[in-house]
Amino acid sequence: MFNKPKVQLNEYLKLKYLLNDKSIEKKISVENIKAYWKHNNSTDIDKLLQYSEQNKQYVNMDKIDSLEKKVFLSLITIMSLMFIIGLSMGFSLLSHDDTSRVNVTSFFFIMIIIPFLFSTVSFFYSIKSKTNLSKWIEENIFMPISKILLNSSTIMPNDVVKSIVFVKFQQGSLALLTGTILALFMTLLAKYVIFGWESTIIDTSSLQSFINFISFPWIFCCPNAVPSLEVIQDSHYYLSSNIIDLEALKSNTALSDSWWKFLGMSLIIYGFIPRFILLYLSNKIYHNALVDNILNDKNANEILLLIDNISHVTTTELVNEEHKTKEDNNSIFETNKKTIPHSLDYIIGWSHTKEILELILKHKNITASHIEIAGGNVPIDKEDALIASIEGSIMIFVDSWEPPQKDFINFVSSILKNKDNSISIYPIGMADDNYKPESKNISIWKNKISTINSSNIGIYNV
Amino acid sequence: MYDNYPSFVLVGHPNKGKSSIVSTLAYDDSVEVSDIPGETKKTKYHPLKVGDKILYKIYDTPGFENAKRALSWLEKNETTSREHSKILKRFVEENKKSSEFKEEIELLNPIVDGGAIIYVVDGSTPYKEEYEAEMRILSWSGNPSMAIINKIGNKDYTNGWKNALNQHFKIVREFNPMNAKLDEKLKLLDAFSAMNQDWESSIDYAKEALIHNNDKMFYNTAKMIEENIRKSITYTVTSSLIKTDITDKDKINYEEQYKKDLIRFEKNNQKNVQTIWGHNRLDSSMEKFKFSDELFSGDFSKDGLIKKSFIIVSSVASASLAGATGFAFSAPTSFLDFGATTTLTTTLSTVGGAVVGFTTSAIGYNKFINSTTIGKIFSKKRFQVGPMKNYNFIFILSARAIQHAVAISTRSHAKRDNMNLNTNENSAENLFDDTEKKELAKISVNFRKDKNIKKSTEKYIEIIMKKIKII
């Protein structure tokens, strides 16, 4: 989920091409937006790569292919060259004849220590911040090299080119080592190699201490690969004025065995392992340089903004109005609270059937001179006729849970036009509740009735 | 491709939950939802948009107020049933200025423009014949339609409603906006798209957009929580330069300020989380952060036994600190005069700012607030409270944030009551598994030391996402 995305050179080049080619219109189609949703938690680079994938038809692939080919060819060239150098240097350093032995110290310093130091220094140089020296090196060494290797286009800035060159150096260094180790292996396979050493400033015991120090990583697991003091003493003197007694030396197999094993282990421990680590780190720096270069591109930020805007989901329009806190309407209106009058002229069931109304009246033990129904499915002309004929005290039974609508308000308002009429509203609850209404519903009715603003209408206080 | 987006018009009797449904589907608590009928006076629409593209619109409308007379108007002007939609359009045109049909005109306007009808009824009240007029008016439009049974109360009249609605609508669905989860909202959208095959792609896209939006809200919530945690852990309150040793009263004041600020950060963070989820109007409250010894003792990242043993020691010590609200913290020693910032762990209890006593490091080996004297310029020094060194802090604050985030993310936008959360900070210890506990302890240190921030942030967000994404 949170793994840092890795950008390949091909993806980088396509994206850079898209970002920098002004002739390409920067747009994202609605159909493609879903792809950006898949990267909900991802970094921006994922979105940009997605954008590049969706617009690949606009990319001039010939240009990119040619640049990629150059990078690949430069890799092959460097690696082949370094491999050949490693192989030939290995062979020459391991060659000996009747009057000479293989100089262990030369081989060790030239083929192991120097390349190791060179790789390490160049790696640290690649990650170090810019100094005058590094600038000079960059301008006078790396850039000319990169021009030869990549014929670098404007699409690739110096940082990226530099990191590519460093990766190539590490790969070349690995190729050199492979050549060397192959040379050692082939020489050991084909010849009996006699190792020796000589030095003006180092004596036997110092060399032994140095070898023990160098051999520390394998001294316990592979003691045969650590030349003993005796072996070091016996192999002293690289050159001999006399013909070497090969037969005598060959009989002392420990002499050669421990030296070639020592050199083999040195090549692995101080050659291959650090080289692989440095190559891995350089690769990481190189990929990071690609990512950073894209993210720092002004056009990339524009695209990201465009992606964010176009893929943003809104479920509603923003409402910037002040939200008023609702006041408790119950306290606003004062409604007459009616009691059941002794004699009723009309009982009307609003939106009831006659049967239901009669059942309610029986249940409530209320009666009146006229019992009518209105609302619901009662035709309008019948309702109008009722309004015209009605007079006196009227009780209207309503379903408390159904809020009063305009048609009801119009109905009672029309009745109240005759000032002698008075209306009591009787809200009833559901049959399940024994017709007892909920107070919340009574409040709703009270509030609505109060809008009529007449003292001749009120709610029966249930 | 999505230019012909569908419009869904929610219509029905007043007070049947139309606005609640819209509010829930639109993730917007600014929709006026009320117990009082007729609160929606004007038709408003809520679009679902991806960028500038509208995928659908949902209309919230006023309820029918004069359906029977409106139907009577239509019937009077009826010619043939083929002409129904035209007559309905004429009704809207001719009665635009009529106060008698104000609500009907408002709600029919988007329908005559082609909006699909979503007829909403309350399944907790019985069906009555007076609804027939409304359903018949709607059928005059000839538009695609369906019905939603929204059970507002406890009673169940769903079956009666289904029988009646099936006569008028091909699709009838139950939907409760008060507890609808994303899955149910998506199912409702499926029902919407079943009204017209042409809307399928638009609705499918809308569903994906809603899922993405939901994921994004969770991610942004986790990110917001992470920002607050990091800010709180690294926060310090520093005194101005002082010449002599700071007084105990001042120490307490600085610590009180520190605590107040942390509470304020949390409150702001909660507000931000509410904004992410569209609960802009929500008035929420949470029990205040308890800066108590018990919570900050032991180590939640290891095991509770340490904590229990602490409480025993703590209770013995606090017996002498009558009525005090003590907490452990580190205080400067006289070594400070030599520029050293050695700390001696003490327990302070405050009643009116009085120092009640000191105990040994047995109680406060797990420091609650790191308060110490820092630096020395021209024999003047500063007193600083924070940054938070206590491991439990990240557990407690995270657990509170998770509790709040879960409550917010699962809360319906149709609800209008206040939200009061009771906390159980001890639950912080059991909320995370062993691996998460170790990770949180590591993250806490990294945040404080400003180390591996990117990695720690990502890990923390991952843990929080796992805890809050329960829907």
Image (spheres, rainbow, N blue to C red):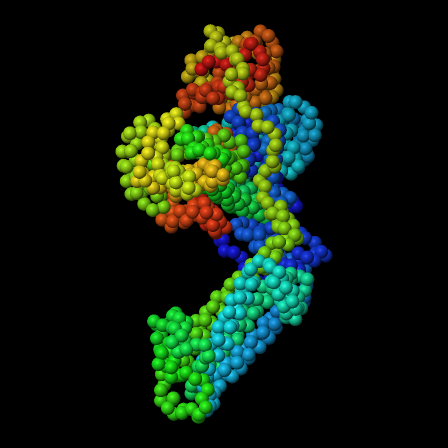
Residue A171: x percent and y percent?
Answer: 54, 70
Q: Is residue B458 visible?
A: no
Taking the image as shown, residue B390 lies to the left or right of residue B41, namely left
Quadrant location of the C terminus of chain B? top left
Residue at x 43% of width, y 20% of height: A435
Q: Looking at the image, which is closer to me, A304 or B184? A: A304
Quadrant of the image occupied by residue B374: top left
- Please tell me which residue is depicted at 61% across the width and 11% down the height of the picture: A417
Question: Looking at this view, is B177 or A233 the one in front?
Answer: A233
Q: Does the image show residue A226?
A: yes
Percent coordinates x, y for residue A272 in the rendering = 47, 71
Compared to B450, does A209 lie above or below? below
Residue A148 vs residue B222, the one in the foreground: A148
- The residue lying at 56 percent from left, 9 percent from top is A455
On screen, residue A307 versus residue B346, left or right, reads right
Residue shown at 54%/33% (left/top)?
B280
Q: Residue furthest right?
A: A23
Q: Position of residue A137 (x, y in %)?
A: 62, 65
Q: Position of residue B228 (x, y in %)?
A: 48, 40
Q: Nearer the viewer, residue B185 or A273?
A: A273
Q: Is residue B164 above or below residue A283?
A: above
Q: Give the vertical position of B158 relative to A276 (above or below).
A: above
Horizontal placement of A260 versus A174: left or right?
A: left
